[in-house]
Image (cartoon, rainbow, N blue to C red):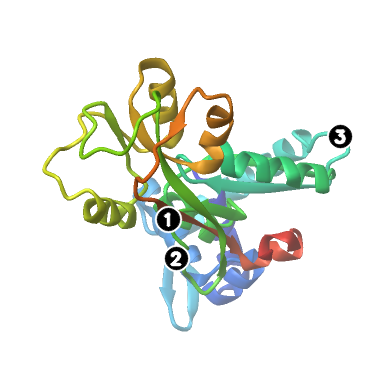
Amino acid sequence: MNIAAIQTFLAVYRCGNLNRAAEELNVTQSAVTARLDALEAQLGARVLIRSRKGAELTKAGFAFLKQAELIWQSWEVARARVSLPRGMSRLCSLVVGPGLWQGLAAPWVADLRAAHPGTAFEIWSGLASDAARWLQSGLSDAALLPEPLSGGDLGTRLFASERLIQVASQPRDTCDWDPDYVFVDYGPGFRARHTEAWPQDNTANLSFNTPSRALAQLIDHGGSAYLPEALARPYLDRRTLFEIPGSPEFQRQTHLSWRKPSVELFPWLTG
């Protein structure tokens, strides 16, 4: 059973209106509706009659009300017992897109922890669809993704623009095709630009959706791939990998999106 959905059901019952419940919970009305829909789907029964005039409990809603209150009270007790670590005053929940942790999100979070020692952080890996749902429901505070999230309750900014460079396990010049080339999928924009730069019919027989896995492949088995410069730099400096001179370069943009109500607790989200 979704605790947030139960909390929303009780808020609508108290307020008698979805708009006021949304204000009380600090979420959008669409998030309230989505939570109620999910709850009714789980219960297999309609618990609220929703209209422009307000919301009223159905017979099933009355039957569920006391149980919902007990579940919520039990959750509050459990949450109070499982408190924040000693010295921490708040928790920031961040969603990081696949492939963005190593070399990008990891050093950023390390800086945040040093700058805000009273804040605990939890990191979730998720796609844009996951992040949008978690932010709108209030489960997460912000998301670092290749694309910005949109919505009336969300803010967004360009977080970083990284060079993607072609590197190889052995020094060499650029060539028409490397049979050991490993393709890293950085999204539809990159795929289109990659096709323009490399219009050959050859296709890589190995691909990853995260650069860290492609990096491990190059280190363990050799080959070449496009990697973020920051991720590849330590290996270039040690001459474990080599940048291929003359090969096309690309850019990978990442965006930080956040719940506007979270800015009050975490003003650094806006930059």
Q: Residue at x 55, y 76 (%)?
A: 19
Is 1 located above or below residue 261 in the figure?
above
Q: CA distance from mark 3 to mark 2?
A: 37 Å
Q: Position of residue 185 (x, y in %)?
A: 33, 43
Q: Nearer the viewer, mark 2 or mark 1?
A: 2
Q: Residue furthest right?
A: 87
Q: Which numbered marker is on residue 86?
A: 3
Q: Nearer the viewer, mark 3 or mark 2?
A: 3
Q: Position of residue 190 (x, y in %)?
A: 33, 53
Task: Determine whether label 1 and label 3 are within 8 Å by CB.
Answer: no
Instruction: Mark 1 or mark 3: name the one nearer the start of the chain.
Output: 1
| Residue 185 falls left or right of residue 154 | left
What residue did someone put label 1 on? 60
Q: CA distance from mark 1 to mark 3?
A: 43 Å
Q: Position of residue 109 (x, y in %)?
A: 68, 43
What residue did someone put label 2 on? 33
